[in-house]
Amino acid sequence: MSAPLLSLRGVTAYYGAIAALKGVDVDVNAGEIVTLIGANGAGKSTLMMTIFGAPQARDGSIVYDGQDITRMPTHEIARLKIAQSPEGRRIFGRMSVLENLKMGAAVTGFAHYDEDLERMFAIFPRLKERANQRGGTLSGGEQQMLAIARALMSRPRLLLLDEPSLGLAPLVAKQIFSVVADLNREEGLTVFLVEQNAYHALKLAHRGYVMVNGKITLSGQGRELLERPEVRAAYLEGGR
Amino acid sequence: MAAPASDAPVQKAPAPAIVPAIKDAAIAALITLGLAAPIMGLVTVQSLGKVQLEPHWMRVVLAVAVVFVGRLVLNLTLWAPRAGKSAPLITPEVEAQLKAVTRYAAPVALAIAVLLPFVPGVERTTVDLATLVLIYVMLGWGLNIVVGLAGLLDLGYVAFYAVGAYSYALLSTQFGVSFWLCLPLAGILAALWGVMLGFPVLRLRGDYLAIVTLAFGEIIRIVLLNWQSVTGGPNGIPNIPKPTFFGIDFTPGPGGFADTFGLTPSGVHRVIFMYYLILALALFTNYVVLRLRRLPIGRAWEALREDEIACRSLGVNTVNTKLTAFALGAMFAGFAGSFFATRQSLVSPESFTFIESALILAIVVLGGMGSQFGVALAALLMIGGFELFREFEDYRMMVFGVVMVLIMVWRPRGIVSSRSPSVFLKERKAISGSLVQEGHG
């Protein structure tokens, strides 16, 4: 098997003196959907941000496509065809939907802007209806679509998705997950997904990791993890 | 789009409870009594070399009565519980009408500005005042880049204005460099200082940034005040030469402007020339800002204002983006500063106090952050208003305080609060600020 597209080895990250990540090993192979599940405060979003260099990892290494990106500034990482739909969506509220999408295409130099815009509108028709509207006036689900579309405008090979289902109605969340599955199947987009909604995430993913207190405690095939009693007890039963 | 909730029929509020209203008014009256009795009721008078207290109880009674009645009336009307939020003063319909008007407002305002010196009845003083207003319009547009677009609260903007003014003053008086050569130099120098301020404050935002920029403005002023050998200290730099009209001086003698063009020599020529000069500079500023907004860098500024982390993860180099905002904003202040120096013929640290920064910031905020026309309108209101009310010297600051509060109550996002997007799908559509909650994008 060829080298993974993204490979984390012994990654630690700190907020001041507090360790948020305590030596994390994660691999994401090209063409895979890999999910990371865990409770609130386990360090999932920190891991996502650490891959993007904010905060930078204190120890360990992050290798993407054969290149060490551990010490790279965030904006340079973003130019390596890694895109992120961050936690809380972080869309530009006072800018229009179109402007948000245009910001996403900035790293490509707008080379395929028109083409990609049409593609996004085909995937998320709602965004086309709202194109001239302010980002801040969209509903939560539409904002999540916008955040994903904005990330996709940079034509990434790897998409980091942080809690796309957060605060969404179950139906809308399902819609978003099915879009992610389609993108993976049809365009070979590699996805690293952080989720609290463990059931949906593990059903969707090829492989999964479970994070507890800044450490990976379990890993395996998505369906397989779904059957594990400890996973069921901690993240599925009662949590659904 | 959903209609605002206030469109729903407002239920007639039941009669407001009179007892709590009276109680509240009585408490307010009591506090007034406590405050007014010693402050207004007792006056010290010098008589026969001794200080005596003279009672003026009538005043106290009046003050207490005014507070009691006023508070009672407010309690029963505006502040009545369950009165519900009154309909907004400017409804979406009015907003739409305003928008239709503002479409023509900018070209009309421009036409008036261009023709102003030749309108019959317009005197030298009016053109002079218009020149002053335009300086502030230009400063407002410059600061708008930093505050309105990039969202970096800068309270020391006047420092760059000062750098521009002193650059021209020193270069022209010490080395005899002409205004036209100094103008770009002053802009570049100010931009350099913008970058110098920008570097240490890269990691700061909001309140912290405001404090540091405030301090920066004061440092520049104090250096100007104390570096006697170079800046002339509190006396400033006098006898700054005036600019020429393509090499032609505005002197009455032969070879002067009037002589060359066969006009009757008059001091008005220079005044009008200066007016057109600042008009051109201001329009240049406006043009550059409008162009930049449509370029990736302009969008990056706005995105930076909205969310810095998202910006970085989209590949925007936030360091460069912030520095260019500081540098460009400072550059326009530098241009305006060198114009100011040549207009006044004298620069001194007095002209670059914090109140100037506050005034420029007030123009940007009142005008509607990010709106070019709003800023121009606010500058006209503030500076023009200042001059109109000059006769009421003692009260004008108060009047302006009240006006500012009222604008912020009725138009919390500034006079012109809509922002037109820089890219469009099919049709251009401005987005009203009132549809978006304050602080939530």
Image (cartoon, rainbow, N blue to C red):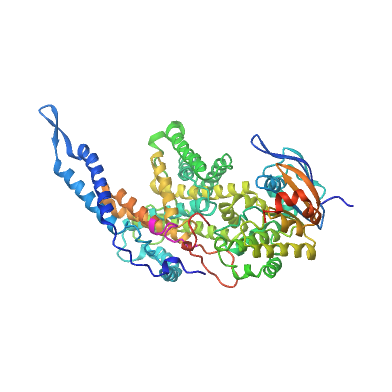
Q: Quadrant of residue A138?
A: bottom right
Q: Is residue B276 visible?
A: no
Report x, y in % for residue B12. 33, 67
Q: As drawn, is B93 to the left or to the right of B428?
A: left
The rendered magenta stretch, by its main secondary structure, is classed as: loop
Viewer-side residue, B17 vs A11: B17
Report the residue that reaches farthest toward the right.
A1
Report x, y in % for residue B250. 40, 53
Magenta segment: does it hold B12?
no
Q: Is residue B105 visible?
A: yes
- Residue B174's place in the image compared with A150, above or below, is above
Report x, y in % for residue B9. 39, 70
Viewer-side residue, B235 vs B112: B112
Q: As drawn, is A109 to the left or to the right of B349?
A: right
Viewer-side residue, B151 vs B217: B151
Which quarter of the rendered picture does the C terminus of chain A lie within? bottom right
Report the residue that reaches farthest toward the top.
B49
Report the residue that reaches farthest toward the left.
B48
Q: Quadrant of residue B273?
A: bottom left
Report the residue that reaches farthest toward the bottom.
B426
- Residue A12's place in the image compared with B333, above or below, is above
The residue shown at (80%, 61%) is: A188
The residue shown at (54%, 45%) is: B205
Magenta segment: does it hold B413?
yes
Please provide the residue range marked out in magenta.
B409-418
Report x, y in % for residue A232. 74, 52
